[in-house]
Image (tube, rainbow, N blue to C red):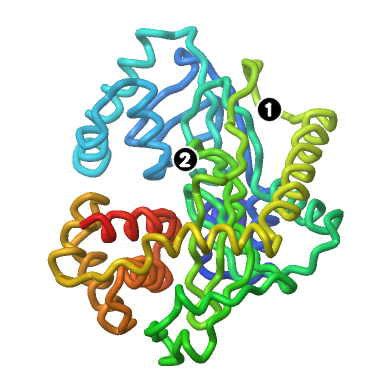
Amino acid sequence: MAHEIAQLTMPESQRNASYEQLLQALTHEEEVKLDTVASGGAIAAQEGDIVVGDQVYRPNAVADEGISSKLSIPLPYLRRMHSEAPHLYDLNVRGWLEREPERKFLLRGFRGAPGTLRAFLSDSYKVIDHLDVLTAALEGVKEARHPIKILGADLTDRRMVVRVESSAVKVMARDLLKGYRSPFTGQTGDDLPVVSAGFVLANSEVGAGRYTITPQIVVQVCTNGLTITKDALGKTHLGAKLDEGVIRYSEETQTRNLSLITSQTRDAVATFMDHAYVERKLTEIQREAGQKVEKPSETIEYVSRRLKFSDSVRESVLNHFTAGGQATAGGVMQAVTATAQTLSDGDAAYELQGQALTAMSLAAAA
């Protein structure tokens, strides 16, 4: 039995998963989750693992970030100790925990032998789990009576991202897509100058960002998603102090969380999946999208430096810009979103896609 549980302690990451695949992964996670609030004096470090009671956890990268933040241990040093000198890791973590033995922390883990420590958080962290978010959000869509389809979902150690598209709201975008060619299919924006309404549902169970619903305009010719981050609706994971011990969430608390998410999703559908909203946002985007880019290499180098793109992302953006054939700031935006689609890391893709409109603005200014 221990072997079977250990196999479930590290659910596989999902990239561009279907709704069914995502639901299966989340269900598996629910079976092995264990949340514990413990004081510093009750937490031990042993051979690079974290021990609470009879449960031994192996911290993942996200958990080490939390330990670094909460104990003020520089992250590069903590990571080096963890990989190269576990005994020093133990001494440092144990030493700083012992300085504040009464301070409480929330440890989020997966049971196993050993288990996985996936987050090391404040005991004021408000838990809003992926499966609850997904269930409540889809209930909100149902209440809004708006036809949608799920384009795909990502599940990583840091977050869940679900991309939703309207099946009913489609708008012509001839100016935005003029001269654009999909780097994936070769089809042109002149042949299919259509965008549709949508939104991105994102949530973190481990402190890597709040729960959000962000509007997105989906370009039909290439499925690039233009994420409008400034209009996002969200809920920060901050709540009352949690009692010490293994956490069992009350039905009343869960009902309140679900009710809020359902109502916010219903409002998001009404606001974002609307012809007038999409047309208004297209008008705003087009003000900068049509600016000519005379020196693509220099412009993309500038944008990449400002947004701290890696060398590989910068090169991919330039290649997609060239393949897209649209020598404008809008072409830079399309190149960024196209690059995001090609990344295998769901977190990197999510973060890059959220920078596409900023990249367009920088290119237009440059």
Quadrant position of residue 303: bottom left
Marks 1 and 2, Cα distance to the nearest angstrom?
A: 20 Å
Count of marks overlaid on the render: 2
| Placement of the N terminus among the 4 image quadrants | bottom right
Q: Nearer the viewer, residue 229 or 36?
A: 229
Which label belongs to residue 208? 2
Left or right side of 170 for 159: left
Left or right side of 284 for 152: right
Which residue does the image show at 75% across and 47% down from the upper left? 267
Which residue does the image show at 30% across and 66% down from the upper left? 291
Q: Residue 206's x, y, as percent?
A: 51, 39
Q: Residue 249's x, y, as percent?
A: 75, 30
Q: Which residue does the numbered mark 1 point to in the structure image?
A: 247
Q: Is residue 229 above or below residue 38?
A: below
**Would residue 86 be visible to someone looking at this image?**
no
> Which structural element holds mark 2?
loop
